[in-house]
Structures are given as structure tokens and as C-alpha cells.
Image (cartoon, rainbow, N blue to C red):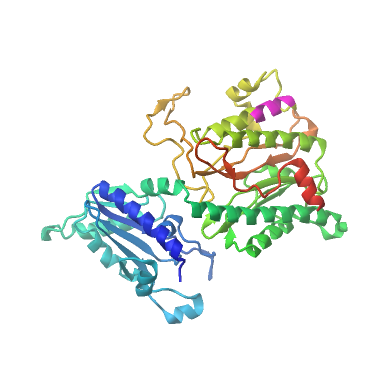
């Protein structure tokens, strides 16, 4: 049976969607889950439900769709479309609920076969003022909606009216998902702890692997295997995203994937990897010396990135803007680039000049944060809703950045990446460093909570863990 606490939360969320749809005049909300995807010929990728769909239903089977009928007065009806019960297919693919059992177990007002979608959806849409669905999320959904609307319009001579307006359901769901309830925060904490254990295991395996005879040949995929083992052993269902395990100069490739490159003594290893637990992601990056000891140049740049991350975390308080952590990190990084001769002072004499000219972008080309939750790059507007658009110095038009509020979860991940070049000090060539944690904003100006605190990140702590 599904978890009763999960079902209560899903019902509460559906009630909030109903409230907002009623306030807008009513209508029908349509929300499909993710499709299955073929890997090749007769093999599927591991299935993962759509996050929006799961957020409102707790239902994890493919080939499903939720419909919510809402009146302007606030009455509503929830209808789940799902696969039929099929004992023969269950022999091959495993248990499936079937409409009747799913309706009772998951608390919907009605449940119908997904095979009846083409006939039943026009009935649900008939006479409704509006239809809500997630824009630009599900390939082909727009075409389906237009087909269902066309079927309703075809009944016009019989006095049947079709919805006159369409709205993006994400406009409601994104803001709901942006704020995590205590249960969600607890799941992310647990996922973060499992992920931190994976990083510790990979650090120790790196040093241990380099102590073995050279014929053993430590490679990036060996460290990835340690991570995946720990994730599953800890109860995680899957990695939250494709693991990045980058040794040496590979760390200067931002989206590098764990491969077969050797891990050598003297290398830095950058690992960006974390697990998903019960539908919620974690996201951790750590950079460590493969043999357990930072060299002088590695330590120097690492301390700059760590100081930048600390400044960004300190800036992540309720009432700050989403961009404030990035701005705080950027000033530290810019000063470090000047101090270590990576940016010449005759080109940019001070921090303000480094930032104004964009000279830092050669070494730091991404932002410091993103939302995190059910998806590792979670939904939510990065601009403050309701605030007026402002004209920027470059002539662009933007709303001010989002104000950080209690129960928002975001990453803090500054980095520096130094590709070999003749105009850069040789001791820094090929060094890539990123340090990433997940934080939750607390109320009342309190310091944020670092959810990934179990993953070591100071020089002393990393070296001690690797010795252990």
C-alpha cells in the first residue's frame, strides 16, 4: 500500500491547486506523467515518474494522467487515468494497480483506463471555461489537448461549449514546489547523508587505489562504482543525475561524465554526484587530491573556492535576493584570481574591474546556485513575482531576483577552472575545483541550514578522511 502520509500530502496539494483554479474561475487541469523511454531495440531506460505528477498523486506507474475538474465555487472532482489491471503483463513487468484499486488506494474521486483517454477527455472538457496543462514539458501534449478541444468544438451545434482559454499549470505548481514542507526537507537531508557517505567512500578508495601496484590502474569509473554502491546500499533508488568523476584536467570540463581516464597521484579529482531518495534529489560536489595530499598550488586555489562558498552560504538568508550568494562568491573568486596572478592587474587592477570587465568568466563561467528538490535543477521562478520589470545597464529588461524565503532549497557551488595556457602560471594548469552544498533557507534571518554538511570539505578534513 502507498504511504498514508504521502497520500495526505498529495491530497493537500491537490486541494491547493483546486483553490487556485477556483479563484481563477474554474476549469480542468490536465497533468500526465512521464513516458517510458527506449534505450535501444528491446530495452528500456529505468523508468522515472514525472515530478509534477508525483507531487499531486504519489502514483509512480507510467501511462497515467491526472485530471482535476474545478468549479468557480470550489467544488472539484479528481480523475486518474492509468493502465488496466493485466495479470499476464504483471508476470513480465510487475504489479500494476488498475483503475479501481488505484482510485481506492490513492484517494481519487474516480479512476478510468488510460485506453479511454480519447473518449473521456472531451467529456471532461465539455462546458468548462478553461483548461490548464504544463506548457513545454511533455512533448506532444499540446497536440493532444488541441485534439480533445476539437472534439468538444465539434459538438457546438448541440449546445456544447469548449474551454476558451488555456493556462500554464506550471505557474501554480512551480511556486508550490519551491517551498519545501518538513517532510520534504527531511527526505533531502537523508538523501544528502547517503550522498556524503558516497563521497567519503570515493575519497578513501582513491588513496587506497593509488597505494596498490601500478598494474591495478585506478580509473575514474572505479570511483564512480564506489559512489553507486553507497547510494544503493543506503536505500537510494537511483543517482539524482549522471555522475561527474573528473581526474586532473578533466575537471575543467563542466559536464564531464565519469569515464575511463586514469587517476594519478598528484591529480585533483572533482566529483559531482549525489543520489535521489523517495523522489527527492541531493546534489554534492567535492574536489580532493587523488593521493590524499593537496599540493601548494592546489591548496591555494582550493582555499579561494572554499572561502567563496563560505561567503555565499553566509549570504543565503531570508530576505536576501537569489543573486546575493553569487555576488558574494564572485568577489572572493575575483580577488583570488588577482592574488594568484591568473588575471593580470594591468588588465583589471581590482575586484570591481575584474567583475565589470567579465575577466573572471575565463575561470568561472557558471552561476553559483540553482533551486533543488524533486528535480536536481528544480522548478521555480528566479525572478520575484509581482515586481516591476527594470531596465538593466545593458538595455535588457528583467525583474529583480527572487527574494529568499524560509523553506526554499538551493545549491551553493562556486568553482575555478584553469585550462593550460601560455599566459597562465604553469603550476595552476589543469586545475579544476568546485565545492557544492545544498542549503535550506531558515526564518528570521537565521543562518541557512547546510543539508550536505556530512561531506567533508576543508583541506584538513579531506586529508584526514582520506588517511582514515
Name the side, left or right, on which 236 lies relative to 31.
right
Query: Relative to residue 398, is residue 68 depicted above or below?
Result: below
Q: Point out residue 222 in the picture as x, y percentages from the top left corner.
A: 74, 58
Residue at left offset 77%, top offset 50%? 465
Which image quadrant for residue 414? top right
Point out the residue furthest to the right here: 213
Q: Point out residue 168 in the picture as x, y percentages from the top left corner.
A: 34, 48
Q: Point out residue 300 in the picture as x, y percentages from the top left corner.
A: 76, 34
Q: Is residue 436 visible?
A: yes
Name the side, left or right, on which 29 lies relative to 51.
left
Name the side, left or right, on which 111 lies relative to 175.
left
Q: Point out residue 401 in the picture as x, y percentages from the top left corner.
A: 46, 33
Which image quadrant for residue 109? bottom left
Residue at left offset 45%, top offset 58%? 50
Q: Is residue 374 visible?
A: no
Query: Relative to residue 268, is residue 217 depicted above or below?
Result: below
Name the side, left or right, on which 26 lies relative to 133.
left
Residue at left offset 68%, top offset 26%? 335
Residue at left offset 53%, top offset 71%? 42
Does the magenta stretch mainly form a helix, a strand or a loop? helix
Query: Relative to residue 210, is residue 1 depicted above or below?
Result: below
Query: Is residue 333 on the magenta stretch?
Result: yes
Which image quadrant for residue 29? bottom left
Query: Is residue 439 on the magenta stretch?
Result: no
The residue range painted magenta reads 332-339
Amino acid at each position: 500500500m502507498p504511504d498514508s502520509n504521502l497520500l495526505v500530502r498529495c491530497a493537500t496539494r491537490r486541494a491547493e491547486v483546486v483553490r487556485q483554479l477556483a479563484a481563477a474561475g474554474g476549469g480542468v487541469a490536465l497533468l500526465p506523467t512521464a513516458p517510458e523511454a527506449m534505450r535501444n531495440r528491446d530495452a528500456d531506460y529505468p523508468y522515472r515518474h514525472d515530478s509534477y505528477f508525483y507531487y499531486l498523486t504519489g502514483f509512480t506507474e507510467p501511462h497515467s494522467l491526472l485530471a482535476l475538474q474545478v468549479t468557480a465555487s470550489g467544488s472539484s472532482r479528481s480523475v486518474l487515468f492509468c493502465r488496466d489491471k493485466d495479470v499476464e503483463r504483471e508476470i513480465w513487468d510487475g504489479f500494476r494497480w488498475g483503475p479501481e484499486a488505484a482510485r481506492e488506494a490513492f484517494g481519487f474521486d474516480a479512476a478510468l483506463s488510460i485506453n479511454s483517454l480519447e473518449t473521456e477527455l472531451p467529456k471532461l472538457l465539455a462546458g468548462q471555461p478553461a483548461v490548464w496543462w504544463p506548457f513545454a514539458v511533455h512533448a506532444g501534449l499540446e497536440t493532444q489537448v488541441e485534439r480533445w478541444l476539437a472534439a468538444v468544438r465539434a459538438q457546438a451545434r448541440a449546445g456544447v461549449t469548449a474551454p476558451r482559454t488555456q493556462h500554464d499549470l506550471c505557474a501554480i505548481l512551480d511556486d508550490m514546489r519551491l517551498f519545501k514542507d518538513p517532510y520534504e526537507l527531511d527526505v533531502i537531508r537523508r538523501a544528502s547523508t547517503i550522498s556524503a557517505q558516497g563521497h567519503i567512500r570515493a575519497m578513501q578508495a582513491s588513496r587506497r587505489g593509488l597505494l596498490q601496484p601500478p598494474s591495478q590502474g585506478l580509473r575514474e569509473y572505479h570511483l564512480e562504482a564506489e559512489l553507486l554502491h553507497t547510494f544503493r546500499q543506503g536505500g537510494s533508488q537511483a543517482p539524482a543525475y549522471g555522475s561527474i568523476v573528473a581526474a586532473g584536467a578533466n575537471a575543467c570540463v563542466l559536464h564531464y561524465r565519469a569515464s575511463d581516464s586514469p587517476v594519478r597521484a598528484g591529480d585533483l579529482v572533482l566529483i559531482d554526484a549525489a543520489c535521489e531518495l523517495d523522489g527527492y534529489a541531493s546534489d554534492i560536489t567535492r574536489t580532493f587530491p587523488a593521493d590524499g595530499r593537496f599540493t601548494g598550488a592546489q591548496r591555494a586555489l582550493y582555499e579561494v573556492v572554499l572561502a567563496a562558498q563560505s561567503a555565499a552560504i553566509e549570504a543565503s538568508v531570508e530576505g536576501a535576493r537569489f543573486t546575493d550568494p553569487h555576488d558574494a562568491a564572485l568577489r572572493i573568486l575575483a580577488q583570488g584570481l588577482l592574488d594568484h596572478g591568473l588575471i593580470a592587474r594591468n588588465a583589471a587592477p581590482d575586484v570591481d574591474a575584474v567583475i565589470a570587465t567579465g575577466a573572471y568568466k575565463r575561470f568561472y563561467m557558471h552561476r553559483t546556485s540553482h533551486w533543488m528538490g524533486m528535480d536536481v535543477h528544480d522548478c521555480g521562478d528566479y525572478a520575484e513575482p509581482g515586481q516591476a520589470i527594470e531596465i538593466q545597464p545593458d538595455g535588457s529588461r528583467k525583474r529583480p531576483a527572487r527574494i529568499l524565503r524560509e523553506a526554499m532549497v538551493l545549491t551553493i557551488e562556486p568553482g575555478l577552472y584553469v585550462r593550460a595556457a601560455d599566459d597562465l602560471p604553469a603550476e595552476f594548469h589543469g586545475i579544476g575545483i568546485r565545492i557544492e552544498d545544498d542549503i535550506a533557507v531558515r526564518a528570521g534571518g537565521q543562518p541557512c541550514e547546510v543539508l550536505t554538511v556530512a561531506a567533508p570539505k576543508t583541506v584538513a578534513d579531506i586529508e584526514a578522511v582520506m588517511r582514515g
